[in-house]
Image (tube, rainbow, N blue to C red):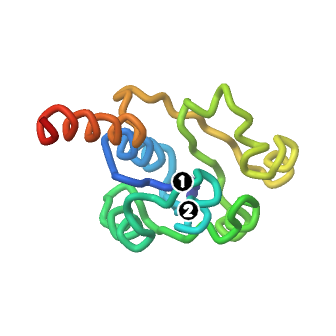
Amino acid sequence: MYRVAYSGGTFDLMHEGHLELLEHCKNIADYVVIALNTDDFVKRFKGRPPVMGFEQRRRLLESCKFVDEVIPNYGGEDSTLPILDVNPDVIVIGMDWLEKDYCKQMSFTPKWLSDHNISLCYVPRTTGMSTTRLKKEVYDYVSDTLLR
């Protein structure tokens, strides 16, 4: 049975945690599609633009052996639009979303997922690395070594 996995995000400053998520996607599906947040959406959602622009982030994801296709998250806050176009069997997200309302964030409900025969898979984060942590480590490094 041919399975399609969908995941989305900003993927700013690629790191081991991103690779962990992408590898999990490839382990559970034959084809992996990543919906990459646009720069405008990231600025609206996070209040600041990503460090790396959309094209840089897209090229890095496309070069990853765990990713088969990268599409822009053209739905912005309404993720149902790109999800329906991809028609995945499973949406793969990090375990950090377990305590948050992922469905609400993406503008769908568990019933909507069920109606479209889409499973939701939470991936454990074993590395502990995140873009926020990476930015803090870079800031601390610059502060401690270069600004003294």
> What element does badge 1 sit on?
strand
Q: Position of residue 99 (x, y in %)?
A: 66, 25
Q: Position of residue 61 (x, y in %)?
A: 38, 62
> What element does badge 2 sit on?
loop
Please give the name of the residue rendered at 52% of the width and 63% of the height, measured from the top-left corner.
Answer: 36
- State whether residue 1 appears in this view: no
Please give the name of the residue rendered at 31% of the width and 41% of the height, measured from the top-left corner.
Answer: 16
**Closer to the camera in the image, 135 or 77:** 135
Q: In terms of sequence position, does the residue under pointer 1 or pointer 2 come before the other?
A: 1
**Closer to the camera in the image, 73 or 42:** 42
Residue 37's disc number = 2
Three-letter code, disc 1: Gly
Give above or below for 82 relative to 45: below
Three-letter code, disc 2: Asn
At label 2, counting other C-alpha atoms closer than 10 Å, the crowd grade (few under 14, some 14-19, many 20 or more) is many
Q: Position of residue 8 (x, y in %)?
A: 56, 55
Residue 9's disc number = 1
Please give the name of the residue rendered at 74% of the width and 65% of the height, measured from the top-left corner.
Answer: 84
Q: Position of residue 113 (x, y in %)?
A: 79, 48
- Relative to 64, 21 lies left or right: right
